[in-house]
Every structure is written in structure tokens, then in C-alpha cells.
Amino acid sequence: MNKKYRFLFRRKIALLGFLFITALIFTAIAAPFLARVSPLTLDPANKLIPPGGVALLGTDNFGRDVASRAIYGARTSLVGGFGVVVLSTGLGVLTGAVAGYFRRLEPFLMRIIDVMMAFPPLLLALVLVSIFGRGMVNVIIAVGATYLTRTARVVYALTLKIRTEPYIEAATAGGVKPFAIVLRHILPNMLSPIIVQSTFTFAFSLLDLAALDFLGLGIPPAIPSWGNMLSEGRMYLTRAPWLLLCPGACIVLTVLSFNLAGDALRDRLDPQLRRNIEGV
Amino acid sequence: MAGDIVSINNLRVSFPSESARIYPVDGVSLKILKGETLGLVGESGCGKSMTSLALMGLLPRPLGRVDGGEIIFKGRNLIGIADAEMAKVRGRDISMIFQDPMTSLNPVYTVGDQIIEAIQAHERVPRTEARRVAVDMLRKVGIPSPEKRIGDYPHLMSGGMRQRVMIAMALSLKPELLIADEPTTALDVTIQAQILYLMNDLRRDLGMSILLITHNMGLVAENADRIAVMYAGRILEEAPTKGLFASPLHPYSRGLLDSIPRMTGGGDKLQSIPGMVPPLNDLPKGCKFFGRCARSTEPCETKEPPLFQKGEGHSVRCWLYEE
């Protein structure tokens, strides 16, 4: 076994997390082949059938296949989470690094971040969605904007620390231009905290995306997503609990997996923690 | 003078402090001739590093700033030129190596990448060409099998090797002036000697000048052509190396030389200079060495001495040598 990946096996539970994420990605990609029927097919004759009958995980109030919807929901969730991570990490890193290295811009940039942080995250997302309307892109922007602030804060602090390292001074003394210093010398040195931060952003953004869907402010109801399934299923809580259990379990397991993966990565990538773990 | 690469005239560097601005460098004038090594000696906090940072345009901004004087490099005043212009000078015309080779290399790149980057920051050459120069430089600084070591990450190298890499990087563009700020302080004694021999060899080969900044008198004795002794932001004495060691004029220079342990003679107690360096916001009014000087006289307390010329290239800032 390659030594690089041995950390996965030292912590069995983290491995489970990684396996689940891999399976989830595979499911999302292969959704059309895995789903029994299209998640949009209505079958009023077979509505609210319990799991195990016509459909593996039962059907909902329109007779749609719950398993199919959950499988396609994985697509929505992963695309949503990925979009949020790309947006918040991209802009957050840019803002934080620029504010940290070009100190003149710091008061301007970081005060904007502070203002955004002053809003409760979900509230900010709610406001943004109600301004721009529903839809995948808008939801990603809304949730991404709330997580941008955290990444920006983390990156800002790391930039302040790394910019005083002698190798940065040495690079400057060698005539490397300021933008190249940030891009080539500062950013690569904070890659691991950014990766770790991203996994947690992914996990938390899935919850927020589901919450927005649940509140009817996320993705339009026709598109299958776990949040939408919860929202529609809650009316049938007593008659058809599988409508809630299935998407609920999906969300819980996915978020848990990403958190476990994030923990494992952090332990692995942080040299100080790593010493503690391997030393004992 | 025709032969100088850099002439620093009356340089003042200031920093804010709680009450007023303090001057870590206050009226320093220095000339560095082509092909020579000038040793700049002084204790911690005397302003020697600040002088070199000002020379590189690398004073910690926005706090530190140059408050006066000029730095003439090849007929051009480097004070007040645009940042982009200064970035062109740094690394190509004036290079610098730092005290701690353990942290002066970026841990996430191979040493080759870093040398290549330094080259490509100034010259539009293809990567293969830059790489060839980098291998050549690594060979020149005495790294064995440079073709292989060029792909090493800094953590795979020892301190001495890393300092060699730093030198290779600093010299890859054949600068006319190399500033070496305590280049060997972090290295052990045998490696120190190797690194200094190397710097001297390369100086001769490339015809560059070196500004060697150190607090180690032994180091400059062997490696510098001329020495400037700095104290509290001022040059107290400037002399050819031989002249300074044969007959140090300033009581401070004398004190510094007396406090070097001798290999000969008995186990006498080591001489030291009494007192402490005064804080920069509370300097004596007259001579800055007043209060620690055993030979101070009446004018020392109130009037700061100018530099008196004593012989060829030997000047000293002390009232004892007033004509």
C-alpha cells in the first residue's frame, strides 16, 4: 500500500466517509442507468406505495419513484455543493489573499466581508434568493456568498502569516513581482487549509441548500432534490414516512461523510496534529 | 569617484514609535567600489540591516521610510523610483542573500523551480534555457550532481546546501552588487568558511561587489577589503581592513576588537564594552557612544563629532581625532 494513502485505513470511519462520497459521485454520474424510471414520471395509479412493492423505496403522492428521485437528487446536491465550494473558495481566496498581501486594500475588502458576516448565513441566503429568484444558479450564488466570508477570513489570516516568511522576502528580493508572489509563493503554502475548509464548506452548504429547498426558496419543485423531497413529503409524515426518511438519510449520510473526510484530511494535512496522532 | 558601484549619501531611514519617529539609520554615507567587498559591522539594532533593506527598496512598508539622502546606483538615484522599476533592479542588478537559509526557500517548490523563477522574472528566456543556467549555477556553487539536485525540494537539503542554492539564485543573473546579510550566522563554522570562500571566488569570477553585513569581526577580517563600523544608525569608523585591525581609532571599534576571544595568551577574562546600546528614542545628545566610552571628553556629551579623515581612506567619528 502506498504510504500516502495509508492514513485512510488508519481511521476506518474516515474510510467509510470517503467510500460513501465516491459511491455518491458514481451514483450522480450514472443516475440515468441506476434509476428504474425517470424521476419525473407520474404514475397516479401507484401513489404512496410503501417501499418494497412496485418501487424499491416506495412512491410519493404523485406516484413518482422515490429511489429515482433520490438518485437524481444526489446530482442536484453534488452540483449545488460543488458550485458553492467553487464560488466561495474562488472568491474567498482571491479576496483574502489580496487583502492580506496588498494591505492598502485591506480596510475596504475586509469591511465588506465583515458586513456580510454580520448577517446570519441562512438569512443572507434567503434575502439574496428572494431578490434574484429561485433556480440552481441563484441558489448557488446565495449560499456561496455566505461561505465566501469564512474562506476569505481564513485565507486573510494565513496570508498575513505567510507574507512575513523569509522565503517571501527572498522572492521579493529576487525581483518577483507582487502578483506572482501571491499566486506562486503564498497560495501554494496554504493549499491544505483551503482544501480542508472546502470539504467543510461542502458539507455545510448541502444543509443550507436543502434548507432553502425545504422552505420553498431553493430549486424549483419539478427538479428532484433532497430538500424538495423533504418539503413535499412532510405533508404525508404519518401516512408515508419513507418520503421523509429516504431524503433525510441521504442528507445526513452525505454531510456526515464530508465531515469525516474533512476531519481525516485535516489530521493528515496539518503537520502538527499529524505528529500527535502518529506519535501515540 | 569613478570606480564605485553604489554610493549612499546621507541616508536616513525612519520608523514611527510611540512618541516621535526614530531613526535606525541616520546620515549614513557609504561607497562600494567595483569588485570589492565592503564589510558593514555592528551589533544588533545598529541599523546595518535597515541600510541594506533601504538599498533594496524593501523597507517594511508602510512603517519604514527613507527620510532623506540618496542611493546612487550606476548614476541613478534609487530613492523614489517607481516600484516596478525597483523590481527590475532587484535580483538583476542588486541581489541579496539572507541570514537563515532554512526558511529562505519556499518549501512547496523544488530549488530548481525557484532559481528558474528568479531568472525568468528578469529575462525572457525559455524554460529549458533558464534550467540550463540554473544547473550551471548549482554546479558553480559546488552542489554535487546538479542535474539531479535541481529537482530536490528544500527540505531534502542541509543548511549549507540551501545557502549555496540561495547564492546560486542570487547570482544567476550576474548582479553587480550582492548584499549578504549575515549569510553564515545560521551555519556551523566549517560550512561558514566554505560559503565565504565560495562567495569570494564568485566575486572574482563575476567581477561583482559584495556588501557583507555581519556582527562577526573575524568574518570581515578575512573577507572584506574595507570595513565600516556602524553604531546607533551612524558610521563611526571606516577604514581598509588592514588599517582597522592594525590601528582601530574609534574607542568603539577598539572595544569590538578587544572583545574577540584570542587563541594565544592565557585564560584572561574576555574584555567587553560596558553598558548597553541606548534605545533609539533615547540617544545621547552628542556622540552616540557617550556613556559607554572610557575616553570621553568634554565636547562628547553635547556635540556629535563629524567624520575626521585620518590617513588614506580611514575616517573616524570621534573628537579624539580632531585636528
Image (cartoon, grey):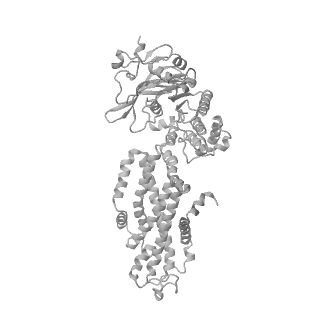
Q: Nearer the viewer, residue B84 or A242?
A: A242
Q: How many marks?
A: 0
Name the residue at the left extreme: B19
- The residue located at (37%, 68%) in the rendering is A133
Task: Please state, as top left, top right, bottom left or bottom right, where the C terminus of chain B lies in the image.
Answer: top left
Instruction: Give the image location of residue A238, x and y in percent.
Output: 40, 84
Q: Nearer the viewer, residue B302 or A32?
A: B302
Q: Nearer the viewer, residue A19 or A88?
A: A19
Instruction: Give the image location of residue B80, x and y in percent.
Output: 42, 33
Name the residue at the front extreme: B267
Reply above or below: A270 against B46.
below
Reply above or below: B50 against A127.
above
Q: Is residue A218 visible?
A: no
Name the residue at the bottom extreme: A45
Q: Quadrant of residue B252?
A: top left
- The residue located at (45%, 15%) in the rendering is B309
Instruction: Give the image location of residue A206, x and y in percent.
Output: 45, 67
- The residue located at (43%, 27%) in the rendering is B70
Reply above or below: A251 against B295.
below
Q: Is residue B178 visible?
A: yes
Q: Quadrant of residue B35?
A: top right
Instruction: Give the image location of residue A94, x and y in percent.
Output: 45, 52
Name the residue at the right extreme: B145
In the visual, does A146 lie left or right of A264? left
